[in-house]
Image: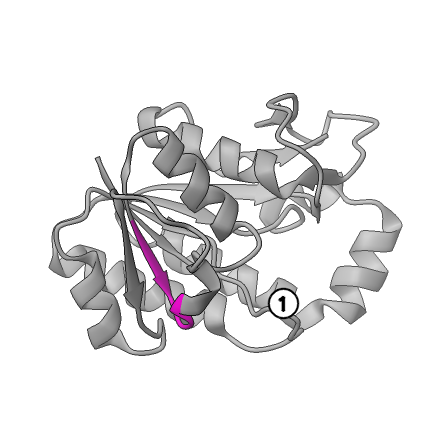
Amino acid sequence: MKVIIFGASGTIGKHLVTQALHEGYEVTAFCRDSQKLNEVNHPKLKIEKGDVFNPKDVNNAVQGQDTVCVVLGSGKKRKGTVRSQGTKHIIEAMKKNNVRRLICQTTLGVGDSHGNLNLFWKYFMFGWFLKEVFLDHVLQEKYVVNSGLDWTIVRPSAFTDGLKTKNYAHGFGLEKKNLKLKISRSDVADFILKQLQSDMYLRKTPAVSY
């Protein structure tokens, strides 16, 4: 299977690239700065330098792919529209090239998962400190849900730098109690990768957290 990862040089993307290669996938890593992936060397890895704000770059990269994974982020910036606008261009390219499967990472707290957050995350982090990031994820999800593609939206809680444990809750609703509201980036990548071979969460929005 040929998989393209948008946001491949980010904190989730790097884990996703290495794990996908380990599982034997043919991986195209789409990123603005290819040097950030210099440490990854594999015969099944293709690094595609481009900008998700440029529809032509995105369209060229999507051609010939089987599955698209979107793990876009804005780095240390707490503003911008890279997630929503980048995803919009990706969806357009997928439709042009008849690529159906889309797995998109957003955040716990969007939509019906808002009730899983505690007061700190509801009102301080997403209500003020990361408000623009949160709203960009909201718009990003809107584009995905209305795309008509075979999508899965993954909603992880706050990222940590822990190890891959494969031991996490997923697909839970508001009835889930005692969530730590944290998950390692490695485990987020693990869950995303599992969706490549499963339709369990097809057109669904599974949350994932410890």
Residue holding disc 1: 133
- The picture quadrant where one finds residue 132 is bottom right
Q: Let me know if residue 203 appears in the view.
A: no
Image: 128 above or below 176:
below
Residue 40 in the figure: left or right of residue 106: left
**In this orientation, which residue lies closer to the viewer: 32 or 125?**
32
- The picture quadrant where one finds residue 113 is top right
Q: Give the quarter of the figure containing the C terminus.
A: top right
**Residue bounds of the magenta highlight:** 28-34
Image: 90 above or below 115:
below
Q: Amino acid at mark 1?
A: Val
Q: Residue at x 84, y 27 (%)?
A: 178
Q: Measured from the top left, where is residue 157 in percent x and y?
A: 68, 43
Colour scheme of the rendered structure: one colour
Image: 180 above or below 98:
above
Q: Residue at x 67, y 39 (%)?
A: 184
Q: Give the quarter of the figure containing the N terminus.
A: top left
Q: Residue at x 56, y 78 (%)?
A: 80
**In this orientation, which residue lies closer to the viewer: 118 or 195?**
195
Q: Measured from the top left, where is residue 193 in percent x and y?
A: 42, 34
Q: Measured from the top left, where is residue 84 in percent x and y?
A: 45, 67
Q: Measured from the top left, where is residue 24 in percent x and y?
A: 30, 30
